[in-house]
Amino acid sequence: MSEPIRLIPYPQFLKPISGEFVWNKPNLNFDAPYFEEANFFTNHLPGLLSIEHDEERPCKICLVAEKPQSARSEAYQLKITPSEIMLTAASTAGMFYALQTLLQLIKSQSPKENTTIISLPCMEIIDQPRFSWRGFMLDEARHFFGKKTVKQILNWMAYLKLNTFHWHLTDDQGWRLESLKYPLLTENGAYRENSQTSGLLQKKTNNLPHGGYYSQADIREIVSYASERHINIVPEIEIPGHSLAALAAYPSFGCTGGPYQVTPFWGIHKEIYCPGKKGTIPFLEDILKETIDLFPGKYIHIGGDEAPKNRWKNCPDCQSLSNQLGLNRVNDLQTYLTNHFTQFLASHNRHTIGWNEILSPQLNPDTIVQYWVGKEKTLLQQIRAGRKTILSNYRAYYLDHGYLHSPLDFVYKYEPVSPDLEPEFHENILGIETPLWTEFVPNKARLDWQLFPRLFAIAETAWLMPEKKDNEFFKSRLKNFLPEFDQNNILFAPPETWEPPQWKRLWGWPSLLQAQTASVNETK
Ligand code: ACM
Ligand code: ZN
């Protein structure tokens, strides 16, 4: 059998044509709107093509702007014939994806002996994504990776046509975003003495201080780097829970007044922001204002998950606010906060997202929900009622889980949209996102292992219509990416770990309570 055409995500429509295009330093011409995409592409292939505007010379690679005709703005067409390569799109994003497809094809071919000449099989592709939200989330609060790693991730995301980088920048174990108004957030909140190394059932720690943060200049640099790759960044500022690092820096915003410490321990912590204290909401508004100034995208994530209300119940300030607002229960202060910040962000032209714990009958209909666990029936009712939703079911899409719990075939085959949801409501699903929480991801080697290759499976689900997906075909293409992983020093999980036998998968659930310790370098 001949090798499959090595593309992930696979296009919606691909028809092979006979013949091949011999790549011999062709010239590339582009219609004016695609100047940046053409440059980006050319920079990725140093010495392999020349870029020019010469109207006289017939182009070999032509970037053609067409009138928008498809409802989907990210659509493109790519036609490779023996004489030329035509890329057509109605938007810069569509052209960017056309070029990523071409780049994947070029990188799948080895040069003929002693030359740089490659040839591409001829084909015709008509393509557009299934979902408009194709996301990956990185938790840098539990472990800080820094600019180099983030840029590498953004490169792979672009290559896989993922367009949303959700950046989890604050949590109990660290605050990673410089604030000019509240410098202690990073001076104190970005560092901890040590880290939990045991699984969740024990509390063993190492003695290694850990920390780091992004300056505002770093953030601007990364936002611009992402934007060149047609990736939008969604920053997450956790409210009201997962906020110990902030409270360690500014204890007066907690119910008890502290003192608090940036914690080395994972899990759920009872110290959360006190909405009853006069300064807390203005403080959070200031932080969100600085966040908006740094991140030009339309969406801001305010967390909302795993916020225990024990402190609120025993806090006179929370009780007094709750009474003043006429709430039935002090717990309802969370919906009050979420609605408050939804309105605040809307007044700055931003949409608010929160994890599905924010769902309640009084929740603002405009607040977007990111679903990860639990109450699926409630979620479906909300989607039917018009709530915009992002799907990140932890069972399939939490990439911090090991391959025993989330084997490659399971991740690939998982269909994110419930069969119980009637088609007329599908438009309320913005798309899918795969989070990498990093409690047990202390370094780049572990990060690579968890992401590669499962990120490829999710990218294909985000792009390709479900009836066109095929796990065996996917894997036959995936295997031909392994040399590219090696060239880029990616310490991917090796193929023998991807799909463990059924009996080993029984260990999948209990394995979640453990630190993921399967040796990353075992096979390298
Ligand atoms: C979450 O996993 N706590 C959103
Ligand atoms: Zn309180």
Image: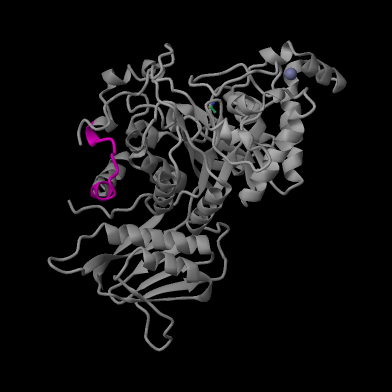
* 358 relative position to 261: left or right: right
Please tell me whether residue 429 is drawn above or below residue 376 in the rendered image: below
Give the quadrant of ligand 2: top right
Rendered location of residue 225, percent (x, y): 49, 55
Nearer to us in this view, 81 or 264: 264
User: Which region shows up in magenta?
Assistant: 483-496
Please tell me whether residue 77 is drawn above or below residue 8 in the rendered image: below
Rendered location of residue 31, percent (x, y): 49, 75
Nearer to us in this view, 264 or 105: 264
| Membership of 491 in magenta stretch | yes
Q: Residue at x 39, y 41 (%)?
A: 455
Q: Quadrant of residue 277?
A: top right
Q: Residue at x 28, y 25 (%)?
A: 518
**How many numbered marks appear?**
0
Q: Quadrant of residue 14?
A: bottom left
* 261 relative position to 513: left or right: right
Q: Residue at x 38, y 66 (%)?
A: 43
Q: Quadrant of residue 81?
A: bottom left
Q: Residue at x 49, y 71 (%)?
A: 35
Q: Quadrant of the C terminus?
A: top left
Nearer to us in this view, 158 or 272: 272
Rendered location of residue 477, percent (x, y): 28, 48
- In the rendered view, how is the structure colored? one colour
Please tell me whether residue 194 is drawn above or below residue 20 in the rendered image: above
Q: Extreme left residue here?
A: 113
Rendered location of residue 233, percent (x, y): 55, 47
Please tell me whether residue 237 is drawn above or below residue 22 in the rendered image: above
| Membership of 315 in magenta stretch | no
Residue 362 showing in the rendered view: no
Residue 108 showing in the rendered view: yes
